[in-house]
Amino acid sequence: MAREMSGAPAILPLAVEGLTYTAGEARLIDDLTFRLEPGPRTVIVGPNGAGKSLLLRLCHGLLTPTAGTIRWSGGAGPDASRRQAMVFQRPVMLRRSAAANVEFALSLRHIPRDQRKQRVAAALAKTGLADVAGRPARVLSFGEQQRLALARAWALEPQVLWLDEPTASLDPAATRAVEAIIDAIHAGGTKIVMTTHDLGQARRLGDEIVLLHKGRIVERAPTADFFERPQSPLSRAFIQGELLW
Amino acid sequence: MTDFGAAFAAAVSLIATLDAGLVEIVGLSLRVSLSAVFIATMISLPLGAAVALFRFPGRGAVVVVLNALMGLPPVVVGLIVYLMLSRAGPFGVLGLLFTPTAMIVAQVILITPIIASLARQVIEDLWEEYSEQLRSLGAGPRQAVGALLWDGRFSLFTAVLAGFGRASAEVGAVMIVGGNIDHVTRVMTTAIALEVSKGDLALALGLGIILIVLSVGITGAAFVLRESARRAHGA
């Protein structure tokens, strides 16, 4: 792990117990218990409404669970959220330049001003955005915006990066660029947890696959095992493209 | 018709020669309205942001009241401020009635709801878009408000201009609490009302032209600002 550089205590593994989220009568996340270890890229798949996005938001702390606990290692407490970042399906671009978008994130994490410039430049260079650093973020193409969202997250050097269908609205070329960046972020020691609709992408990016259905974990297995030897009939149906409702 | 033509010519000459009486009136008008806009902005931006971001009991009522107060009749505001500031009123001891300060107070009351309502709408829309991202990045309430005010700056400036337009054009409130006293509380709108009733159309028309130029200029500036912001920032 490359975490020694930052000197921050590790927040992984994450222990989730009895996690439940309800809206009215519906149990959208239904009594989930699992652990997330540092290292392997975890890809969460499942049909629409399975609770994938909800699960990421609950773990990241954007939503409060109805029941259950989310415990980060080392008693990091509220500090744990400062060592995570999230990239959303639709990139949220502040009405500022590309560089200022990244710098704003660094300033919120209290990175000293003299270090920010260099970290901004590094993040933009690594995501191929150095040329558009001064352009307003919201006039960039959709693919560039998503790369900028990744640059903004990467600059924070998170221990965990949550990605909610980061390529769902992108064309194949932009998707490849985003996947390459995700790989590079992972190579730097960041735990990747992402959701996707795209089983091809799940094969390419996932070290392990979690199939979520109606708020429950149907199967969790290393990628090869999940696709070659699915244990659950639901997994087999899902891989063959039959909808699970 | 010839009367009108002569009056118009006289008005243009008053403006062209920067007639002292006219300049004094325009100066006081701007002083009163700009002060009112400044104070109202200081109150309404935080107020609008607070109502937009925070959920508290009675929030819905505050939104409704703010929206309703956008259409406050100036004469009623004038009447209320008059009652407050008159000798027998609760703030009578301050001796503010028939001073420019009283006019500023009345205009602040008149335009604070306008700026606050428009600001709330702008900030609420932005917050809906930014909320998850800002919370994910770890922004506290103060940092979030700062980011929203900055990113909404063009739309918010339009809201402030709307307030200025209302303040500089109203006559009812400043007439009642200012009294239209020559050299003391006479502003463009009250002067126009007086000069028309006296039959001195030249000064009235001159002031009228300036008022219209001012309001067209403000609307134009707001339009140009929004358009250039939209092009430059995709805002």
Image (cartoon, grey):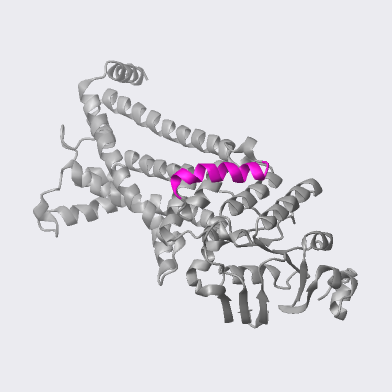
Residue at x 72% of width, y 66% of height: A40
Q: Residue A223 occupies which quadrant of the picture?
A: bottom right
Residue at x 41% of width, y 70% of height: B56
Toward the front, the furthest residue is: A4
Which quadrant does the N terminus of chain A fall into? Answer: bottom right
Number of marks drawn = 0
> Which of these two is toward me, B191 or A109?
A109
A171 shown above or below A226: above
Q: Is residue B61 magenta?
A: no
- Tell me where residue A43 appears, x and y as whole percent: 74, 66
- Tell me where residue A194 appears, x and y as whole percent: 70, 63
B69 shown above or below A45: above
Residues rendered magenta in the picture? A112-128
A191 displayed left or right of B138: right
> Which of these two is toward me, A82 or B145?
A82
Res A23 seen here: no
- Tell me where residue A144 appears, x and y as whole percent: 68, 44
Q: Is residue A113 magenta?
A: yes
